[in-house]
Amino acid sequence: AQSVTQLGSHVSVSEGALVLLRCNYSSSVPPYLFWYVQYPNQGLQLLLKYTSAATLVKGINGFEAEFKKSETSFHLTKPSAHMSDAAEYFCAVSGGGSYIPTFGRGTSLIVHP
Amino acid sequence: SQTIHQWPATLVQPVGSPLSLECTVEGTSNPNLYWYRQAAGRGLQLLFYSVGIGQISSEVPQNLSASRPQDRQFILSSKKLLLSDSGFYLCAWRGQGMTYEQYFGPGTRLTVT
């Protein structure tokens, strides 16, 4: 069984500040982990993925995430927030032959000027 | 490159009317296909998935159904819509032989009145 917990349904930052979106997972098999971004009235777009290679994963738009097995975490970060980063972010886990991912409930990122 | 299309983009339907949403994928063969629903302020709910033509798995019992008449076509239907069917419907695909990530379409906003 797999599960994902995204801490904080809303995260508010100022433009230029560090972005940190938290994701903790539970999985009985080696996990594949993903972050997706969703802009209003659009589909989800893959930001980055962890597939058991490097633990620090770089994605699009300057985002990166670090897989920490001991903490069962896969937090998403970006050094400097832009107004265009305002969106909903979803963490997801898959693996063990199951091609149906489990998604977190999402975190809404709000960026203030 | 692969592309996924959904139509219509928006739809307003009265309670009790039928529904047909279509999803098509280009640039890949034999994809796994998925239908999700997002209710307002909530996360993703998997409705159906398909690993091949005519093969449909249902995750949530309800008044919706899905069909896959062609390799790259996935249709979501209902004979009689309920108010609770309102939401944002997303189609996604996963390629054979790839890792576990999914790629999403632009979505259909359905409002049942």
Image (cartoon, rainbow, N blue to C red):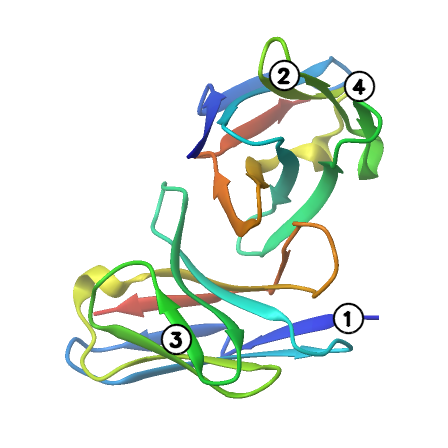
User: Residue B105: image x %, image y %?
Assistant: 60, 65
Contact (Cβ within 8 Å) of mark 1 with mark 3? no
Looking at the image, tell me whether mark 1 or mark 3 is earlier in sequence order. Answer: 1
| Parent chain of label 1 | B
Could you say whether the residue bearing mark 1 is in a helix, strand or loop? loop
Crowdedness of circle 4 by 10 Å Cα count: few (<14), some, many (20+)? some
> Which residue: 58% across, 16% down?
A72
Q: Nearer the viewer, mark 1 or mark 2?
A: 1
Q: Which residue is mark 4?
A: A80
Q: Are marks 4 and 2 on the same chain?
A: yes
* Separation of residues labelled 2 and 3 (CA atoms): 35 Å
Could you say whether the residue bearing mark 4 is in a helix, strand or loop?
Answer: loop
The CA span between labels 1 and 2 is: 35 Å
Quarter assignment of residue B103: bottom right
Find disc 2 in the rendering and name its residue: A13
The residue lying furthest to the bottom in this view is B69
Task: Identify the residue under disc 3.
Answer: B11
Q: Residues within 10 Å of mark 2 (few under 14, many from 20)?
A: some
Q: Residue A10 at x, y = what percent?
A: 48, 23
CA gap, disc 4 and disc 2: 10 Å
Q: Quadrant of residue A60?
A: top right
Tell me the SS state at disc 3. Answer: strand
Q: Which residue is mark 1?
A: B2
**Chain holding disc 2:** A
Could you say which is closer to the camera, residue B73 or residue A69?
A69
Task: Check if mark 4's residue and mark 2's residue have beta carbons within 8 Å.
Answer: no
Q: Answer yes or no: are tags 4 and 3 on the same subunit.
A: no
